[in-house]
Image: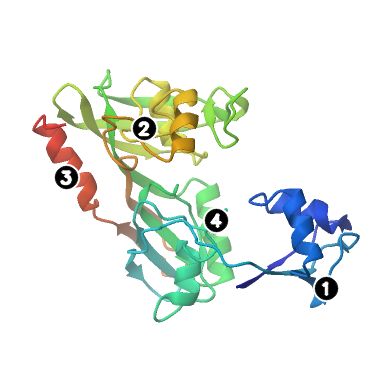
Amino acid sequence: MIVSSRVPRSTPSTPLLDYLARRFTYLSADTWRERIDEGRILCNGSACTSASTVGGGDILSYDMPEFAEPPADMAYEIVYEDTWLLGINKPGNLLVHRSGRSFTSNLMYDIRHVHRPPHPEAHAVNRLDRETSGVVLAARDRQTLRRMHGLFSARAVEKEYLAVVHGIPKPPAGTIDLPIGRAAGSRVSYRFSANGESAREACTVYETRERLGGRYAVMVLRPRTGRTHQLRVHMAAIGHPIAGDKLYGMPEQDFLHWRAAGGLPPGWPCARQALHCRMISFWHPAKNERVSIEAPVPEAMRVFIRNAASHTI
């Protein structure tokens, strides 16, 4: 399979090997050197060498060796569609964008190239973590994308999530105002923490919807900001991590152990984190009316809630 990527126009002249190793971290610099020497890397249609340089606007093509992509749940559903936007109910275990070895097994690749009819100009407006299910908005043209990004930047988009958390939060409703930044000293590059390095303002409004015995609670979460992992970090910070959250629901050393082992600890409550974006509401920039897009809670999460309520887990 051949994949192509445009070098951002702001990129100065850079050694090809340095650019590949920094931009596409799923391979090491040594492996990228091997791929270049094998003639698998082209720049603007011409074969490259280890001494080649690239700059802004160049088109790089990579003839990838055959490999198996990680499994993904491609059973998404388009729940809203108009001339300008798509509303998609994303399942858990599906990336929104290409990452690592998931070149084709991601939502936006499928929407653009596999879905019938395809939507080749679609661009995701918001993102959800791989294991978080629910509403993803996709703009069908660049102008709509810019206008929707403007709404998100102005905090004019309402988002509502349903989550199951460990324990019963006290008070049962409130606001979490804790800045979020990179977790200092973490061995996991994508781990964040409250009051972490270069922390930025983050605010979440929470409400307890249902107590599931004494072990779990169903929560409605409304983020007022959009920081990476915000809801997961905030709930863990107040002592009530989201059920099934592997990164924030166990000590980091345990997370690293089970990630390497490819399994889950005995008694782990659910296969994926119990977090679902069930509604996004905004003033439609083209239709000039309020639009609310909803996604039903997935069956696996409903089963988990029923079992927790009946004390069978």
| Position in image of residue 27 (x %, y %) | 67, 52
Q: Which of 65 and 18 is in front in this view?
A: 65
- Circle nearer the N terminus (1, 2): 1
Cα distance, mark 3 to mark 1?
54 Å
Q: In this view, does 249 lie above or below 163?
A: above
Cα distance, mark 3 to mark 2?
26 Å
At label 3, which amino acid type do we have?
Val
Residue lying at 13% horizontally and 37% vertically, measured from the top left = 307
Asked if residue 289 can be seen in this view, the reply is: no
Cα distance, mark 4 to mark 1?
38 Å
At label 1, which amino acid type do we have?
Ala
- Circle nearer the N terminus (4, 2): 4
Name the residue that disc number 3 marks.
303
Name the residue that disc number 2 marks.
205
* Of marks 3 and 1, the one in the foreground: 1
Name the residue that disc number 1 marks.
47
| Position in image of residue 162 (x %, y %) | 28, 41
Residue lying at 48% horizontally and 54% vertically, measured from the top left = 126
| Position in image of residue 46 (x %, y %) | 83, 76
| Position in image of residue 246 (x %, y %) | 40, 34
> Relative to residue 216, is residue 253 drawn left or right?
right
